[in-house]
Image (spheres, rainbow, N blue to C red):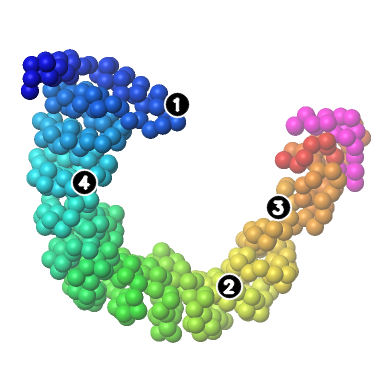
Amino acid sequence: MNPIAQWFQQRRVRRAKNTTEADLKGKPYLYREMRKLLGETWHPPPARILELGLILVHNPDPAVRALAIQALVESKAPGIEIHLLPAVKDPVPAMRRGAIDGLAAIRRGDFSNHLIPALQDADDAVRAAAATALAVGGAECVPHLVTALNDPVPLVRANAVSALGTLGKYADERVVDAIIQMLPREESPSSRAKAAAALSRMLESPAAGYLSDTVSKLLSQPDAPREMREVSADVLGRIARPECVAPLRVALSDPELQVRFRALESLGKLAAFADPGMADDLLRVLRAECDKDARWSAMSAMKKLRETPVAGYLAERLTGLIFHNQETEDTRVAAIFVLAHVAGAGSLPELERLSGTGPARLRSAVASGLGEIKGERSVAMLRRLAVDRDAAVKDAALRSLKNHDVPLCRRCGTVADRLFGFTKEPVCLACYSKPGVCQSCGKNVGSDAALIKIGAGKNCRECNVRLDQVVSGGFRTSTRIR
């Protein structure tokens, strides 16, 4: 280096050492804001990039170095990787983590050789960041990520298994076994979900056949750890192949609730491969399962059979459950919900039989189920149920009528067949002509004896709205009903 260039380099180093947090906070962001106003991205000149790189190397203040990393990453300028790589070995853990996150964010080039040693860093956050960043690497990263699955920190293990899922095409039998063996140590459901997602992304790898066989066998082994069986059921649902149905049906008898719940969710994803045997197994769960969430999962899985060839068979079996008096009321209510969704308008004759003579809880279920069936016949049935003697049935019918776009009274919630007066809102006749009630706030403004004193031209004593005139004993106002 000639003396002039050496003098300029030393000057830049002195400037880098003397740069303060306030200086660095102003200058890079000033460039970015000016470029933003011009409608361009921030591309700082090479001299500025060099200055930021020198700050990363020479400035003693960690806060200044952190701002330099942030400015370099936000610039996305060519060549900033050269300045970020030395920061991976910065003595301050926060700097190492920031540099690794920056390299992962810009996603330019393969720096796996610089990031793999960070998996052995003393700082937990640095190891977690390195595991995430290695997802953009290649096959050489897989063995090191497999080793990271034994890390004592859950976040490091979770990031490592996510990275292995991204690199799923390089997976082999060892990777599959390592992920499955880590599951008993995972207490977080999100970590187990990440493991299932990673395994399901290995279907294009050489370990695809081994993966399917392994998870199917694990699911049928009651002595295997619960976490392994639960993730196996999740993986089979994500694979979504016809051969996955049989082991999932067997898992519906698993002694652990979490495994049964996951198997029901996965069967719902395999509705395209359903057969009458699968429908019978789901009905058995609906009748025998004690857990409410599992029963809802079984109902959800059966609802997805609506457009399949099994829909007719399932509707027939559900009808038998509904009219079988020996079944529990919970089972019959659930069957009504599923039948209305699966059979649609074809279930109206059965639902009409229950709407008049069934117990109140069954009539309420019928009213809720009719909300999913469009048509004049279902609306007529709901209108009859809307005046039911039971309050729960009436409320369910009114909610379903609202789904059919039938106007309801804004004050009492009942069906409003006409729009009365000039309120432009649906109002029933009973509320409109109720004596002594303000049409604006719904409050009583006077008794029958005091109606003459509170006539046209007066104001409501509750909301102070002008009462225009008396009609059928009730007050009309100049405002819309609230």
Residue at 42% across / 67% down in the picture?
A: 297
Q: Is residue 67 visible?
A: no
Q: Amino acid at mark 2?
A: Ala
User: Rounded to the nearest whole Å, what is the CA distance between mark 3 and mark 2?
Assistant: 25 Å
Looking at the image, which is closer to me, 40 or 142?
Answer: 40
Residue type at tag 4 = Gly
Q: Quadrant of residue 479?
A: top right
User: Looking at the image, which residue is at 11% across and 16% down?
Assistant: 4
Q: Which is more foreground, mark 3 or mark 4?
A: 4
The residue depicted at 13 percent of the width and 39 percent of the height is: 123
User: Which numbered mark, 3 or 2, is in the foreground of this view?
Assistant: 2
Residue 222 place in picture, x, y as percent: 21, 74
Callouts 4 and 1 close, C-beta under 8 Å? no
Tell me: residue 465, above or below residue 274.
above
- For mark 1, what is the residue? 37
Q: Nearer the viewer, mark 1 or mark 2?
A: 1
Q: Residues within 10 Å of mark 1 (few under 14, many from 20)?
A: few
Q: Position of residue 370 (x, y in %)?
A: 63, 68
Q: What residue type is disc 3 on?
A: Gly
Percent coordinates x, y for residue 461 in the rendering: 78, 30
Magenta span: 454-474
Q: Which mark is residue 109?
A: 4
The secondary element bearing badge 4 is classed as loop
Sequence order check: which comes first, mark 3 or mark 1? 1
Residue that mark 2 sits on: 340
